[in-house]
Image (tube, helix red, strand yellow):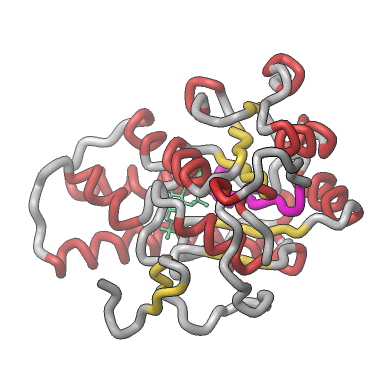
Amino acid sequence: MPDAHCAEIDGLILTELAPRVTVTPLAPPSIAPHHQDPMTTMTLQALIFDLDGVLTDTAELHYRTWQRVAEEEGFAFSRSLGDQLRGVSRRASLEAILAGRVLSEAQMTALQARKNDHFLTMLNHMTSADLLPGVLPLLDDARASGLRTAVASASQNAHAVLDRLGIRPRFDVICDGHSVLHSKPAPDLFLLAATRLNVPPSACVVFEDAAAGIVGARAAGMMVVGVGPPSRVDGANLVVSSLANVRLADLQRLVADRQPPAAEEMYA
Ligand code: B16
Ligand code: MG
């Protein structure tokens, strides 16, 4: 059960009682996909973006900073383990690196704090030049088409990263590592984003670079575009190598048909 700092709304255990960004007031319960009349065609209403690995390559900073802590502590770490930590919360990442080693709560807290200090130091060098290709045009197109936009990131640093990139005001809603108790691969972050956007989950398309996020978004009843190599994002409804390859018309078709366009159309 949630502790005194949590609230439960529509089955989502929220950890932020006062959102730290401008969001729409909490909406009435969103329409879960299984409530949707199968004879009606859903229209795309919102784009929900993962942050690390989709809008910017902070995935690499997470990798390097965990690698540094692992080296300092004598823990094994590898590129493949780092890849498995994409989209995984800070605490769960440390547990994966520990691979069964048991540390005291104080040690766990200290290691997470040290990793985050390294991360924040590297973040100081980030600028809007670190936006990944295609981000700004896609956000511009979305806004021009009347779509709503959200970030759904497991990172507790999401606001700081968006500020460094200079794109925080471009999102209607930001849900981050402080927003829900159950992070990815649970669907909670995505469902919270849809609720705050006041759109049904089945009208949302999610962009994700990680297996944990793809599992969560699909469990939320959303169509998912995987950003990255097919081997990493093969659970997505559609795969692109970069947001620069995304066309709104394809996303609209994805939601309307609940069927992906041919993969070769999108992966270039
Ligand atoms: P922090 P995302 C995730 O962000 C990262 O992919 C993951 O590597 C990281 O461990 C997690 O955020 C927590 O980040 O330490 O900043 O709270 O991909 O969900 O945007
Ligand atoms: Mg990510």
Q: Is residue 54 left or right of residue 235?
A: right
Report the number of discs.
0
The secondary structure that dominates the magenta segment is: loop
Rendered position, 234 above or below 105: above
Q: Whole-percent x and y of residue 101? A: 10, 47
Position of the N terminus, as image quadrant, is bottom left
In this orientation, does residue 39 appear? yes
Q: Whole-percent x and y of residue 146? A: 86, 57
Report the residue at 63% width, 73% height from top. Answer: 27
Q: Whole-percent x and y of residue 141? A: 87, 48
Report the residue at 62% width, 42% height from top. Answer: 207
Rendered position, 62 above or below 77: below
Q: Is residue 38 left or right of residue 97?
A: right
Q: Is residue 143 magenta?
A: no
Q: Identify the image quadrant of residue 67.
A: top left
Position of the C terminus, as image quadrant, is top right
Report the residue at 36% width, 78% height from top. Answer: 6
Direction top: furthest residue:
264
Q: Is residue 45 magenta?
A: yes
Rendered position, 173 above or below 63: below
Part of the protein shown in magenta: 44-55
Q: Identify the image quadrant of residue 103.
A: bottom left
Q: Whole-percent x and y of residue 72? A: 23, 49
Report the residue at 38% width, 30% height from top. Answer: 79
Judge by depth and name the residue closer to the eye, 131 or 200: 200
In this orientation, does residue 60 appear? no
Judge by depth and name the residue closer to the eye, 109 or 70: 109
Q: Is residue 70 left or right of residue 243?
A: left
Direction right: furthest residue:
144
